[in-house]
Image (cartoon, rainbow, N blue to C red):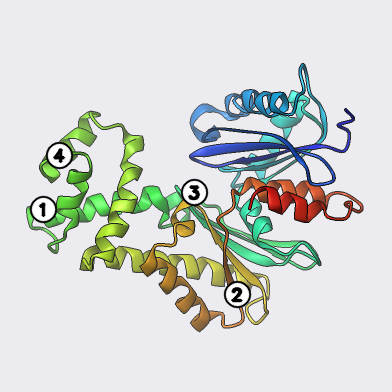
Amino acid sequence: MDLSTAAFAIDAGNSKTDVALVTADGTVLGEARGSGFRPQNVGTGRAVAGLAPLLAAASERAGLTGRVRVGHVQACLANADLPVEEQQLAEALAARGWGETVTVANDTFALLRAGLPDEGEPTGVAVVCGAGINCAGLAPGGRTARFPALGRLSGDWGGGDGLAAEALWWAARADDGRGEPSELARALPAHFGLPGMPALIEALHLGAIAPARQRELTPVLFAVAAGGDAVARALVVRLAEEVVTMAVVALKRLDLLDADVPVVLGGGVLAARHRLLHERVPALLADRAPKAVPVVVTAPPVLGAALLTLDRGVSSPPGAYARLRAHYA
């Protein structure tokens, strides 16, 4: 099989990584899924090396054995937030010899591409809210808008992990009297089968509950908010404000505030379509960027990485984009 026009599409998020082996006509030959991509925790070399079993698994599912080298590797990676990080990751990927060429972008660009039309110059803004929160935009001529997305250090608020931490903070204060009463003080420990907040605080502090499980509390927060709890609702409303603020700032930077362009929304938190958040974001967007069109993407973001591989072709065969989208529908 001639793989010189094939590509590996990689979407590596904080919580999971998807890999697809894609041909130039939009056929997905093989796929694989693994754990999150966190070079800031394990180092660039080790994080990139961790992709090797996934590329091998996708190749095997395509019926290929031995060393597989394709024409291009399109890697949309979480924690590729700064230009220097993109460069380091690109060099590490190139050194593995998986493709003739390598392109690295932040994983928000995979979501953005997945939500944009396949015709014309790609233009729009995307906000991803999964474990973290980030925003990126594209304008005619290839201009981009980016945020560092380094958490509180760079002014960020929100994301599943951040919401869980906020819910715990407000629940602790509701329980001991320092804050407003909230159903969170009962619902959060109940999720883990614990009698109250003191027991939950102790379990998290001493490691009886793994830190990674803290993100399980984000859906609990949304459920409590849906029940009318004022504290939980205020957190969801604030998240909607953050999502729209990021989108509007990106639109302004790209001179697109008055343009008819998509604002793509995705990531686990936004794709879940929690009612209060799902209603609040479009309402705020309509007020602040009336011509923007909200688009919720529920397809896996690896679709966007795969579409970017087709974009590189001088001319993709008829039906390539439709074939690829149909695969992930």
Marks 4/3 in contact by CB < 8 Å: the verdict is no
Spatial separation of the CA atoms under disc 3 and disc 1: 31 Å
Between the C-alphas of marks 3 and 2, the distance is 27 Å
Q: Is residue 243 above or below residue 57?
A: below
The residue lying at 12 percent from left, 62 percent from top is: 181
- Which comes sooner in the sequence, label 4 or label 1? 1
Q: Are marks 2 and 4 in contact (CB under 8 Å)?
A: no
Q: Which residue type does callout 4 highlight?
A: Leu
The residue sitting at 74% across, 24% down in the picture is 96
Identify the element where label 2 is drawn.
strand
The answer to whether the residue labelled 3 contacts the one labelled 2, judged by CB atoms less than 8 Å apart, is no
Residue topped by disc 4: 194
> Which class describes the residues within 10 Å of circle 3: few (<14), some (14-19), or many (20+)?
some
Residue 2 coordinates in the image, percent (x, y): 90, 30
The numbered mark, 3 or 2, whose residue comes first in the sequence reads: 3
Q: How many marks?
A: 4
Label 1, residues with CA under 10 Å away: few <14, some 14-19, many ≥20: some
Q: Earlier in the sequence, mark 3 or mark 1?
A: 3
Counting residues from the N terminus, which is met first, the one under dot 2 or under dot 4?
4
| Residue 289 image point, x, y percent | 56, 80
Q: Secondary structure at mark 1?
A: helix
Mark 4 is surrounded, within 10 Å at the Cα level, by few (under 14), some (14 to 19) or many (20 or more) other residues, namely some
Type of residue at label 3?
Leu
Q: Which residue is mark 3?
A: 150
Query: In the rendered image, which quarter contains the N terminus?
Result: top right
Residue named by callout 2: 293
